[in-house]
Image (cartoon, grey):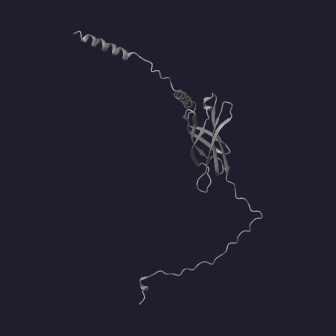
Amino acid sequence: MTARLPLAAIGLLFAAACATPVATGRPDHVLETELRRLQALQQVFREQNTTPIEFDFPADGRVTVREVSLDGWPGSAYVRCRFHYQNRTDKPLVQAWVALDVLDAEGRVVSSQACNCIIPVPMAIARGSYYSDELRTPTYDAHLQPGWSWRIRCTAIREVDEEPLDPPAPERLRREYPPMQIKDRSWRPGDLPR
């Protein structure tokens, strides 16, 4: 019985030692702190930018932002924007440029990326037609400053009417051909050669 008492006491001391919280002595890494800060900024960005967001450019069309987010990792964050462009002008367009700008707290452009919206065949973007794409613009740590923002710009080139020749080209005369006469080559059962 005396041998059990030290074993029980040792077991209780061991259990008490295991239950006592001990600091690991490992401080947070600098990148972990920066990552938590970026995640907090991403949450604020999501709350402030609910989609869809429409940007109307009367002379150039409409850009609808379907999704916008602050992505990346500490030291390399960027604004990602999925959008579609719609020609809402009165004429067909040859092409349109949609740009995503990141602005600092004073409103200066920090970074900009643009997309050339063209149809891959030689035809214009007709009224009502859509073009979808995605832009990613680096923030260059502007997102760490309070008051930074982003914006969408759009510029379109209208299809121009054909330019008249100077001097004008003479009109071509149409040649008139006499009507063609086609022989009756139909076959009848009585027309067999003998």
Instruction: Farthest residue to the top: give it.
Output: 2
- In the picture, the quarter occupied by the N terminus is top left
| Residue 36 or residue 93, whichever sits in front | 36
Q: Residue at x 58, y 47 (%)?
A: 131
Question: Where is residue 149 shown, x and y percent of the image?
Answer: 63, 33
Left or right: 138 as drawn, with respect to 23:
right
Question: Where is residue 28 shown, x and y percent of the image?
Answer: 50, 24
Question: Where is residue 95 shown, x and y percent of the image?
Answer: 64, 50
| Residue 156 or residue 133, whichever sits in front | 133
User: Is 81 located above or below residue 172 in the figure?
Assistant: above
User: Is 25 located above or below residue 163 in the figure?
Assistant: above
Question: Where is residue 29 shown, x and y percent of the image?
Answer: 51, 26
| Residue 73 or residue 136, whichever sits in front | 73
- In the picture, the quarter occupied by the C terminus is bottom left
Instruction: Farthest residue to the right: give it.
Output: 167
Left or right: 30 as drawn, with respect to 10:
right
| Residue 27 or residue 35, whichever sits in front | 27
Instruction: Farthest residue to the left: give it.
Output: 1
Left or right: 144 as drawn, with respect to 14:
right
Left or right: 129 as drawn, with respect to 170:
left
Quarter of the figure with residue 145: top right
Labels in figure, total: 0
